[in-house]
């Protein structure tokens, strides 16, 4: 089979086989993202189920750390399964990954909670998240490579853009299933056992995905490579330990996928967490808002994938990173204004100041039994949990004593009950007294939400996501030759998305708690996005027009 035969077999127009390839690959990947993102959506909820009580921000950080664990291990899945994909084949490998993902997700639905088995509960949860991350590390590269190697050369951006919709559609599916579950049962029942339903459903999706993927054949380009004896016998070495291949892997990470990753997770997950955790919007309303923005924005993955076939991939990716970095602070401040105007008014009217010894204030990221919390940490936890920005005044030598000032009111010493009382007295809108006189949380007043403007902002952030993510699969596929393509493209993608992107909720939450500004967590995605723009502009060239059959235009040194 020659390169000409491979290209002519794909035809001048999109054929039925290519449509089935796109459908089958995309559908299975949607279900795999659904499995992976169920935990992400429920991460704040899992904080109370799988981690010890007593410090809400610490529990939330633990939940986000577990969330991040699945992302941190993704590059290792990319290496392990990428090697198999380049040696054995694309179809076999992503068939295995979806089985691992589905089984791990189903097992999460069977886990006992912290109340039942103590610290063993989060240990088991982390273990399953690691298996999910390994599976996803092998899934995406396989699906993207599989579709790209079936696609017509002049429609590769368009065809692979369908794979790019799967992450957002998987998140949308997770939001829908969770929302339907929560709305059809009492909150107490959902907390007790209802949260398990979305995870247990995954076994049905797994069976359907495996059935569909068993009908797929290996890609013609991979078959040609194997028939001609041109496959790599050591794809890991050829990808990461031979120059200039390792240079391209590094540039793909820093000049494309790192910025793409943080824009993706800011526009979808961090926006969701900001609505629910900081702005105190109830979960169902937040799900509806985010879900609608995903529904409206998803077609733009195809639009920008198609556009990348016309004008190039890289310029669209870098433009998305640059626009996002320039507008994030404004967009999130606007969310506060339009979603919870009472909270915005309270902060403007009542400056909050914490006076503490700086030596007693710690920066917590990975929280566990080893973590020690001072009164300063507890004070910052309480205020961060309220979604209020505050200023910290140094009081050297004060030891563990902290003082709160809310507007003109002042409270000496940390006492959670007294501090909450001070906020409530000052007019903080998201606390209230129940019938027993205890101070309890209160959701944002939905009657005061500016629905059109809120949705415009959320859709705009999803548009940024589609700009950076729509063309990225075609760009990465075209950077590397067939014999190491699965391995080489998977690693920078999953480091960019798994490490740079996946760590975003955890790092942003920790930065907010440490600095006292609810918007300071945005500095992380902004800095990474700017780095990507600079490196991409200087060191990368566009890949549109590269022949992935012959490898013309791609330089490779192979051992």
Image (cartoon, rainbow, N blue to C red):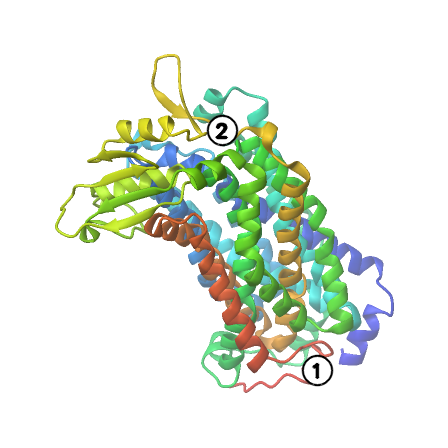
Q: Which quadrant of the view contains residue 146?
A: bottom right
Residue 549, horizontal then vertical, whole percent: 71, 78
Confirm whether residue 111 shows in the render.
yes
* Label 2 – label 1 distance at C-alpha: 59 Å
Residue at 53 percent of width and 42 percent of height? 336
Q: Which quadrant of the figure contains the N terminus?
A: bottom right
Single out the residue that lies furthest toward the right. Answer: 12
Above or below 555: residue 125: above
Residue placed most toward the observer, 147 or 389: 389
Residue placed most toward the observer, 420 or 78: 420
Q: Mark 2 falls on what kind of element?
A: loop
The 10 Å Cα crowd at callout 2, few under 14, some 14 to 19, many 20 or more, is some
| Mark 1 lies on residue | 550
Residue 106, horizontal then vertical, whole percent: 50, 38
Q: Is residue 345 left or right of residue 338?
A: left
The 10 Å Cα crowd at callout 1, few under 14, some 14 to 19, many 20 or more, is some
- Badge 2 vs badge 1, beta-carbon distance below 8 Å: no
Tell me which label, 2 or 1, sits earlier in the chain.
Answer: 2
Residue placed most toward the observer, 124 or 179: 179
Q: Which quadrant of the view contains residue 90?
A: bottom right
| Mark 2 lies on residue | 443
Above or below 500: residue 244: below
């Amino acid at each position: 089979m020659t390169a000409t035969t491979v290209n002519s077999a794909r035809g001048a127009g999109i054929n039925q086989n290519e449509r089935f390839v796109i459908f089958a690959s995309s559908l299975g990947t949607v279900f795999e993202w659904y499995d992976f993102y169920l935990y992400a959506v429920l991460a704040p909820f899992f904080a109370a189920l799988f981690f010890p009580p007593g410090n809400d921000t610490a529990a939330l950080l633990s939940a986000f750390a577990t969330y991040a664990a699945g992302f941190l291990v993704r590059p290792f899945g990319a290496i392990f399964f990428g090697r198999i994909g380049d040696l054995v084949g694309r179809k076999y490998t992503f068939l295995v990954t979806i089985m691992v993902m589905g089984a791990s997700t189903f097992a999460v639905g069977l886990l006992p909670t912290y109340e039942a088995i103590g610290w063993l509960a989060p240990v088991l949860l982390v273990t399953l998240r690691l298996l999910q991350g390994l599976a996803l590390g092998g899934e995406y590269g396989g699906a993207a490579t599989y579709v790209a190697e079936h696609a017509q050369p002049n429609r590769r951006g368009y065809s692979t853009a369908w794979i790019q919709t799967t992450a957002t559609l998987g998140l949308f599916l997770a939001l829908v299933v969770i929302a339907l579950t929560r709305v059809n049962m009492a909150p107490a029942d959902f907390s007790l056992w209802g949260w398990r339903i979305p995870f247990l459903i995954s076994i049905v999706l797994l069976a359907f995905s495996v059935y569909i993927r068993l009908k797929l054949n290996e890609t013609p380009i991979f078959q040609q490579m194997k028939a001609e004896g041109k496959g790599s016998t050591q794809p890991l070495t050829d990808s990461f330990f031979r120059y200039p291949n390792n240079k391209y892997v590094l540039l793909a990470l820093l000049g494309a996928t790192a910025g793409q990753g943080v824009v993706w997770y800011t526009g979808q997950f961090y926006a969701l967490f900001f609505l629910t955790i900081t702005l105190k919007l109830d979960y169902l309303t937040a799900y509806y808002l985010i879900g609608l923005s995903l529904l409206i924005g998803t077609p733009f993955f195809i639009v920008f994938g198609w556009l990348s076939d016309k004008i190039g991939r890289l310029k669209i990716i870098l433009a998305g990173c640059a626009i996002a970095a320039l507008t994030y602070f404004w967009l999130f401040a606007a969310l506060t204004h339009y979603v919870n105007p009472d909270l915005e008014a309270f902060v403007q009217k009542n400056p909050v100041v914490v006076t503490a010894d700086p030596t007693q204030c710690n920066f917590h990221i990975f929280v566990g039994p080893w973590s020690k919390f001072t009164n300063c940490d507890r004070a910052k936890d309480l205020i961060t949990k309220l979604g209020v920005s505050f200023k910290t005044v140094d009081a050297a030598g004060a030891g563990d004593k902290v003082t709160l000032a809310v507007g003109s009111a002042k409270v000496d010493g940390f006492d959670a009950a007294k501090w909450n009382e001070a906020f409530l007295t000052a007019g903080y809108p998201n606390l209230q007294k129940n019938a027993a006189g205890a101070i309890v949380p209160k959701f944002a007043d939905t009657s005061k939400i500016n629905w059109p403007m809120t949705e415009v902002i959320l859709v705009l952030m999803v548009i940024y996501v589609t700009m950076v993510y729509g063309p990225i699969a075609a760009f990465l596929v075209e950077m590397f030759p067939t014999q190491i393509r699965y391995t080489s493209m998977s690693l920078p993608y999953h480091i960019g998305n798994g490490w740079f992107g996946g760590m975003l909720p955890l790092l942003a939450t920790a930065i907010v708690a440490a600095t006292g500004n609810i918007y300071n967590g945005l500095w992380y995605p902004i800095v990474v996005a700017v780095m990507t723009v600079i490196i991409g502009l200087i060191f990368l060239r566009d890949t549109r027009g590269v022949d992935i059959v012959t490898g013309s235009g791609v330089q490779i040194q192979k051992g």
